[in-house]
């Protein structure tokens, strides 16, 4: 018998009428002879209202009490939906997360699912009942049986985890938009519906601010090869299919805490070119990568560091056989960037042979310790990191070629991986170069200036932040090495969520004397705009087009990072929405 998990979000169960509509849809599915497990969110804005209530009582309520409070929202909607189903003559019953046995870690307000017991749900399904489960909540594995929540937006994760555990045929996420759109329709009304998207692309988009799916839900679907569909609660249109890799046989215990790192990859086919001290004004990245694309050179990693004074460094890697071409382009541009008051600026630095070593794995999302562990492992193996580039599911480091094997061996040991697959260079594929764009306005930029350049400093900084449970993103290290008190030093910049800014600042201030850095710069007025597409691999020119479109709107790029399927730029907060609209338009993603 077909088993389906259907999840309905807050808006979809926002009123009695809507709950009745949902009941009809569920009833119809059951009438088709399918077994149905329904997961619901709290009604409408209930969770937000509960948060506001708590704030009226306490400035910093304990996470435990917040979980106790917020988990009540879902308890209302499951009961009402079950009643509505029963009214239609459909046998149904509601169960809280604890009653199902959605067992989680104790980490309140961000608990990961360890395991979901199957017997109770299965027993009711076998009796022909629809089981209505409260999303977003679980029960801790500790003796105390604490009520936990999975983090805001976590009902998606409840639904997908249930589908994986029950080995459902598919999981449908019903929401208030027709499916996954090319970008957030509230900012870009002409956002278009996608008929499909790969899990990898969705994982990046979801983590980069596309709120339509909880990133951890995508992670589970990907790990268990589950078929996931996002569609509208108001229509019968097919919505968007999230394409998972082939189903793997994977243990269902430790559901969300399996190995964080799936593979370590070494690529020794690359060289690095950097353009140093370019003026901090719109247009230069666009010009540089535009020229490079004209030469049909595919650029792999791109990073642009924060500006020191009023100049930037832009560094990138390309295949070795085209390093000379890329260098020539950079050298041709450099003189035009020198201004009369800065005649010695804009210099090209080339390193024809470098290696990149990367760790990948969807399980590293929201686990700040993983990147830190990588840096620490490299430091202990005495490997100096030249460039760092992170995405949600990958941390890549550019290192000296001679250090490659040592780095891989150390990382395989540290992350308990047997083989060390040498990365096949990512292959051209049939996916569109740009699938969607996303905007994240909740980040802040942090820079640590003049950090002495020796192995271990990245490990120290990010290790300490990880201890405080602070997730960092877009870690960038400047290319320019300067002598400070005769010690070569570099700047390191990264982004953190604004909510973590205060604790980040405190932690870094304590660390400053210890690592001998000179200054910390913070900027809250930033927005991160990102573009995602699996088909950008082997398609030169995507980055250039993005950068040029921003410069045409006079939008200055403060930071750049890339991964194989993503390019992210930090711009000023006031220009974030315009940046998103411009990029969406230039790639022709909207409804015509
Ligand atoms: P639910 O309550 O059903 O879980 P959410 O509000 O969490 O719904 O997520 C759906 C909302 O996500 C949409 O109403 C839309 O405003 C927003 N959104 C942001 N980015 C996207 C995107 N790329 N595609 C679709 N919706 C998006
Ligand atoms: N009700 C919870 C929230 O608003 C969970 C969810 O809707 O997914 O965050
Ligand atoms: Mg949601």
Image (tube, helix red, strand yellow):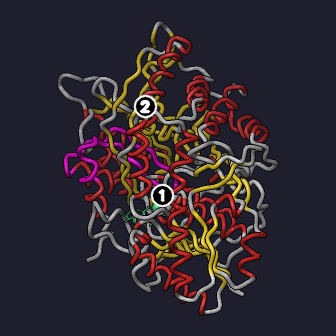
Residue 487 within the segment the image draws in magenta: no
Query: Helix, strand or loop at disc 2?
Result: helix
> Which residue sits furthest bottom?
32
Please state the horizontal and vertical placement of residue 279, each as a whole percent of the image: 26, 32
Please state the horizontal and vertical placement of residue 353, each as a whole percent of the image: 58, 38
| Tally of marks | 2
Badges 2 and 1: C-beta atoms under 8 Å apart? no
Q: Residues within 10 Å of mark 2 (few under 14, many from 20)?
A: many
State left or right for residue 565 relative to residue 522: right
Q: Which residue is mark 1?
A: 206
Q: Which residues are magenta?
A: 552-579
**Snapshot quadrant of residue 377:** top right
Residues at marks 2 and 1, CA–CA distance in whole angstroms: 22 Å
State left or right for residue 559 relative to residue 364: left
Which residue shows up at 56% across the image and 45% down it?
109
Q: Nearer the viewer, residue 516 or 112?
A: 112
Q: Which residue is mark 2?
A: 501
Say whether residue 538 is visible. Answer: no
Which residue shows up at 74% across the image and 57% down it?
115
Q: Nearer the viewer, residue 564 or 507?
A: 507
> Which residue sits furthest top?
485
State left or right for residue 200 relative to residue 19: right
């Amino acid at each position: 018998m077909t088993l389906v998990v259907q999840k309905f979000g807050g808006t979809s169960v926002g009123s009695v009428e809507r709950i009745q509509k949902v009941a009809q849809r569920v009833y119809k599915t059951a009438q088709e002879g399918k077994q149905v497990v329904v997961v619901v969110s709290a009604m409408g804005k209930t969770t937000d209202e509960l948060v506001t209530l708590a704030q009226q009582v306490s400035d910093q309520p304990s996470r435990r009490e917040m979980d106790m409070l917020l988990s009540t929202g879902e308890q209302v909607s499951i009961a009402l939906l079950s009643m509505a189903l029963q009214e239609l003559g459909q046998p149904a019953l509601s169960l809280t997360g604890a009653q199902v046995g959605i067992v989680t870690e104790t980490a309140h307000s961000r608990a990961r699912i360890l395991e979901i017991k199957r017997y109770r749900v299965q027993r009711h399904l076998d009796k022909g009942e629809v089981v209505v489960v409260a999303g977003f909540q679980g029960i801790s594995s500790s003796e105390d049986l604490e009520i936990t929540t999975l983090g805001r937006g976590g009902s998606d994760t409840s639904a997908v985890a249930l589908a994986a555990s029950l080995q459902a045929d598919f999981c449908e996420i019903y929401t208030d938009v027709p499916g996954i759109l090319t970008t957030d329709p509230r900012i870009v009304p002409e956002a278009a519906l996608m008929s499909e998207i790969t899990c990898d692309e969705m994982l990046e988009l979801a983590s980069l601010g596309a709120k339509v799916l909880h990133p951890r839900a995508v992670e589970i679907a990907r790990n268990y090869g589950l078929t996931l569909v996002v569609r509208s609660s108001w229509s019968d249109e097919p919505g968007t299919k999230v394409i998972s890799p082939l189903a793997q046989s994977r243990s269902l215990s430790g559901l969300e805490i399996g190995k964080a790192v799936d593979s370590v990859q070494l690529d020794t086919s690359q060289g690095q070119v950097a353009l140093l001290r370019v003026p901090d004004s719109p247009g230069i990245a666009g010009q540089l990568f535009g020229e490079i694309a004209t030469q049909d050179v595919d650029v792999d990693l791109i990073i642009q560091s924060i500006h020191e004074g009023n100049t930037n460094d832009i560094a990138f890697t390309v295949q070795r056989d085209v390093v000379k071409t890329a260098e020539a382009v950079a050298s041709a541009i450099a003189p035009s960037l020198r201004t009369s008051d800065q005649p010695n600026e804009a210099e090209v630095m080339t390193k024809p042979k470098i290696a990149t070593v990367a760790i990948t794995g969807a399980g590293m999302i929201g686990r700040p310790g993983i990147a830190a562990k990588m840096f620490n492992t490299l430091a202990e193996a005495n490997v100096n990191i030249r460039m760092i580039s992170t995405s949600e599911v990958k941390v890549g480091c550019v290192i000296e070629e001679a250090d490659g094997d040592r780095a891989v061996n150390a990382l395989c040991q540290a992350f308990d991986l047997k083989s060390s697959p040498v990365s096949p260079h990512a292959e051209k594929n049939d996916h569109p170069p740009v699938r969607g764009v996303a905007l994240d306005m909740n980040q802040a930029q942090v820079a640590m200036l003049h950090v002495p350049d020796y192995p271990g400093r990245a490990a120290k900084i990010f290790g300490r932040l990880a201890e405080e449970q602070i997730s960092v993103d877009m870690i960038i290290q400047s290319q320019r090495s300067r002598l400070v008190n005769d010690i070569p030093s570099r700047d390191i910049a990264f982004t953190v969520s604004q909510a973590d800014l205060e604790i980040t600042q405190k932690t870094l201030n304590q660390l400053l004397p210890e690592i001998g850095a000179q200054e910390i710069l913070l900027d809250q007025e930033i927005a991160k705009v990102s573009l995602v597409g699996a088909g950008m691999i082997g398609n030169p020119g995507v980055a250039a087009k993005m950068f040029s479109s921003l410069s045409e709107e006079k939008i200055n790029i403060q930071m750049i990072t890339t991964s194989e399927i993503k390019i992210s730029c930090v711009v000023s907060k006031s220009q974030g929405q315009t940046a998103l609209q411009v990029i969406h338009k230039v790639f022709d993603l909207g409804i015509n």
